[in-house]
Image: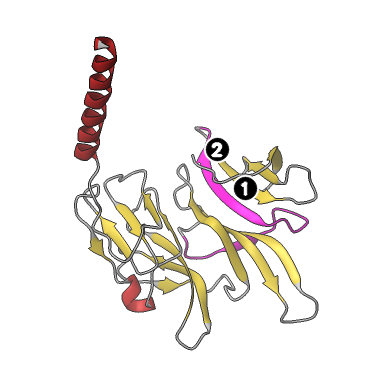
Amino acid sequence: MKKFILLIFLITFISIFCYSQDDKVFTQIPIWGGQVEGAVMSYSSPTIIYAWNSLNLWISKDAGENWQKTKFSEKYGCGPKYVGVHHSSPNIVLAWIDYQDPSGQPNRGLLRSYDYGENWEKITDIDANFVHVGNNPIAFSIINPDNVYLFGNFWSTSEGPMEEKVVLYKSTDAGKTWKELSPFNKYVPPKYICVTHDGTNEVIYLAVNDYSKTLPATLYKSTDSANSWQQFGEFSDITDIKA
């Protein structure tokens, strides 16, 4: 009986201790308007963090101690859907926006800021009326910081039969100009992109759903800056790719 009581005491003590430690480590981030939908940081400047939800984009320049609103929602009336940050120049930010304006018209596209999210310009190299992106579609390179990729699909019915294809856009000047790449010769719904490196070369992973296969979630890999691809694995599902 004494051993049983001692065991209960130890479990209670450990639980309280863990809660106390967690209470010291975690603090609430003062971001308003519902849940935080995403956060990114620059590898060269980990104290600079961007976080966003459907209402706005926020920035912290002191590792999350203090947060400030950017002028994103002031200009567009909402928050971004996805955000990517340059890994050597954290003042350069890309954001994908996708919402309907009050008249019901879609407002979709890729935006770029060079001043920590205060001012934004729309990228015109990408026909956003026909491009739809998957999850986490913006990926900056770490080893080649000015290289950035946008992964999605292209649907067009403006002329003739519907055109549907996977598109990978690449920029080598930190998002100023873009070139369209065609990584696959058939349409496979895009899921995720991840850009990492092997110490020397940029390594890019693309996850797609190929429903012609028994295991539809398929991973592809490129080690030559998206010029060629090799299949890397097949899975029942892929929920995310991280590096």
Mark 2, Cα crowd under 10 Å, few <14 / some 14-19 / many 20+, is: some
Q: Nearer the viewer, residue 89 or 139?
A: 139
Q: Looking at the image, which residue is at 60% across and 67% down?
A: 132
Classify 124 as above or below 231: below
Tell which circle, 2 or 1, labels the residue nearer the N-terminal end: 2
Against 111, is 144 above or below? above
Q: Quadrant of the N terminus?
A: top left
In percent of the image, x 24 and y 51: which residue is there? 28
Which class describes the residues within 10 Å of circle 1: few (<14), some (14-19), or many (20+)?
Answer: many
Secondary structure of the residue carrying tag 1 is: strand
Q: What is the total number of numbered labels drawn onto the structure image?
A: 2
Circle 2/circle 1 CB separation < 8 Å: no
Point 62% across, 47% down: residue: 206
Residue 157 x %, y %: 73, 78
Q: Position of residue 21 (x, y in %)?
A: 22, 33
Amino acid type at circle 2 is Asn
Residue beneath disc 1: 206
| Quadrant assignment, res 142 | top left
The segment highlighted magenta reads: 175-198
Amino acid beneath label 1: Leu
Q: Tell me the residue that label 2 is attached to.
A: 201
The secondary structure type at the circle numbered 2 is loop
Give the camera-side residue of 23 and 123.
Answer: 23
The answer to whether residue 195 is magenta is yes
- For the question of whether residue 116 can be seen, the reply is no
Residue 211 location, x and y as percent? Answer: 76, 51
Q: CA distance from mark 2 to mark 1?
A: 16 Å
